[in-house]
Image (cartoon, coloured by chain):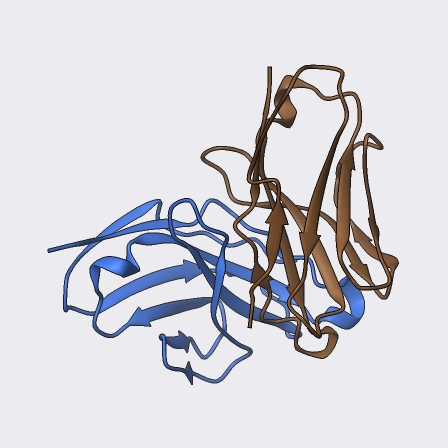
Chain colours: A brown, B blue
Amino acid sequence: DAGVTQSPTHLIKTRGQQVTLRCSPISGHKSVSWYQQVLGQGPQFIFQYYEKEERGRGNFPDRFSARQFPNYSSELNVNALLLGDSALYLCASSLWDRDHEQFFGPGTRLTVL
Amino acid sequence: DAKTTQPPSMDCAEGRAANLPCNHSTISGNEYVYWYRQIHSQGPQYIIHGLKNNETNEMASLIITEDRKSSTLILPHATLRDTAVYYCIVRVARETSGSRLTFGEGTQLTVNP
């Protein structure tokens, strides 16, 4: 079975632009979470979606938004990019009743110039 | 969620047991201890979790002290591929806070040949 997939792998944007990152969960997983990992730090929780509804939100500005589609894939959108948004963006999926084991994708490396 | 404290780095000889400590002195009765690891350039990977009893799986053992204020992750026979950042996470069950994981800075374990 395929693991969690994310696209694109790498992305370079300039300040003020907008970006959309995509995530496909493991088949059968309906819960998707997004994390931001700045270099040298642990991942920070951004959002969780389950059954197309937001179930959790971390301490991130409104420039960050996300959605989940009927096939349980998800998109993370970031508007008005800042230099500080440069990071590895990780997506994780899990079964709702086994969420202790979250499966992470390889991430999207976003560089903002 | 309770705060955790881990040493920033540890070394271990290949083939020997790696014992990674975690302090969580403010843990509540309904909070679980989770361990994840992140190999360089990959997403985090679930290792093991527990509430108060010691746990063992094919990857590792988790020893939780009787007062639950600290725990130790044991990799019985460390290999070079176990070189990674290990994160100890404490959180309540999904029903109250969703599936978010709060990562600290973790312990960089280096397994030496």
Q: Position of residue B13 (x, y in %)?
A: 13, 59
Picture layout, residue A17 above or below residue A5: above
Residue A18 percent coordinates (x, y): 77, 25
Between A8 and B101, the residue placed more toward the observer is: A8
Q: Is residue A53 left or right of residue A97?
A: right
In terms of depth relative to the viewer, which is nearer, A48 or A67?
A67
Look at 56% across and 46% down and name the residue there: A107
- Residue shown at 56% from the left, 64% from the top: A3
Instruction: Give the image location of residue B59, x and y in percent.
Output: 36, 75
Q: Position of residue B57 (x, y in %)?
A: 40, 82
Q: Residue at x 41, y 60 (%)?
A: B22
Q: Against A19, is B56 above or below?
A: below
Q: Quadrant of the N terminus of chain B?
A: bottom right
Q: Is residue B5 left or right of residue A66?
A: left
Q: Quadrant of residue B82?
A: bottom left
On screen, residue A33 versus residue B74, left or right, reads right
Q: Which quadrant of the figure contains the C terminus of chain B?
A: bottom left
**Residue at the outermost left position:** B113
Give residue B29's quadrant in the image. bottom right
